[in-house]
Image: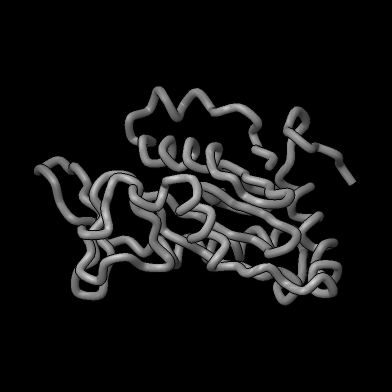
């Protein structure tokens, strides 16, 4: 498994607002993912606006975007709400993390010029400070909670969203995934080999 950047960014331990991202970073580092998985943290190619929190790229599966929301994230009346501190106290800000994750994937695909049809994708919300019982629907395939950060559990949940594809499909999509990996990689990254 290759991490980009290879070492944990200092901001994850110094900025309390990023405690959710720190929990996910640590969980991904400990998880026994099979194969050659690339994990990009907060990276975007030229021509793209907001970088995804965590982008996982696996030649056997495709692109997987993990959008992290720290703090309290609820689902009420068909909407996600994140508890935010404002000038007049706390309030429930409406958020759409799955759409946000999908939009970030689309921006990466567009910025790299890769045909969208060549890239299998999946998105997931990571709410690492929440538990399954915080949601009326319980466990959900597209939501990671604190229970899901255990190494084997994390691997099974992520891999269930993007199953391994037949070898002929892997060979067809490998060039597109390589273009995306090259666009997100930086000198000093693990496994960095431009071109």
Say if residue 127 shows up in the picture.
no
Q: Quadrant of residue 165?
A: bottom right
140 up-or-down from 59: above or below: below
Q: Which residue is the extreme one toward the front? A: 152
Residue 112, x across and y down, in percent: 75, 58
Q: Residue at x 80, y 55 (%)?
A: 179
Specify the farthest residue to the right. Answer: 195
Q: Report the side of 132 relative to 46 (left or right).
A: left
Q: Is residue 162 left or right of residue 85?
A: right
Query: Which image quarter: residue 173?
Result: bottom right
**Frontmost residue, 111 versus 24:** 24
Q: Is residue 142 above or below residue 88?
A: below
Q: In this view, does 86 lie to the left or right of 114?
A: left
Query: Quick check: can you spot residue 64?
Result: yes
Q: In this view, does 49 lie to the left or right of 136?
A: right
Q: In the image shown, does 57 or 159 lie closer to the viewer?
A: 159
Whole-percent x, y for residue 73 in the image: 26, 55
Q: Is residue 123 above or below residue 31?
A: below
Residue appearing at x 74%, y 34% in the figure: 190
Foreground residue among 131 and 120: 131
- Quarter of the image for the N terminus: give it: top right
Q: Position of residue 154 (x, y in %)?
A: 48, 52
Measured as percent of width and height from the top left, residue 175 is found at 85, 61
Q: Which residue is drawn at 85% across and 74% down?
A: 168
Kindly identify the residue that appears in the image at 73 percent across and 62 percent down: 60
């Amino acid at each position: 498994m290759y991490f980009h950047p290879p070492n944990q960014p200092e901001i994850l331990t110094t900025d309390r607002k990023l405690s959710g991202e720190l929990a996910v970073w640590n969980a991904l580092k400990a998880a026994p993912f099979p194969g050659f998985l690339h994990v990009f943290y907060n990276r975007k190619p030229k021509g793209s606006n907001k970088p995804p929190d965590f982008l996982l790229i696996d030649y056997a599966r495709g692109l997987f975007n993990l959008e992290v929301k720290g703090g309290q994230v609820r689902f009420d009346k068909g909407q996600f709400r994140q508890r935010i501190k404002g000038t007049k106290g706390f309030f429930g800000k409406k958020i759409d993390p799955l759409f946000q994750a999908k939009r970030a994937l689309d921006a990466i695909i567009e910025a790299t010029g890769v045909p969208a049809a060549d890239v299998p994708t999946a998105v997931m919300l990571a709410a690492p400070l929440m538990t399954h019982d915080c949601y009326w629907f319980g466990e959900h395939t597209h939501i990671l909670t604190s229970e899901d950060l255990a190494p084997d559990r994390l691997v099974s949940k992520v891999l269930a969203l993007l199953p391994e594809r037949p070898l002929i499909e892997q060979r067809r999509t490998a060039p597109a995934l390589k273009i995306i990996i090259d666009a997100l990689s930086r000198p000093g990254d693990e496994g960095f080999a431009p071109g």
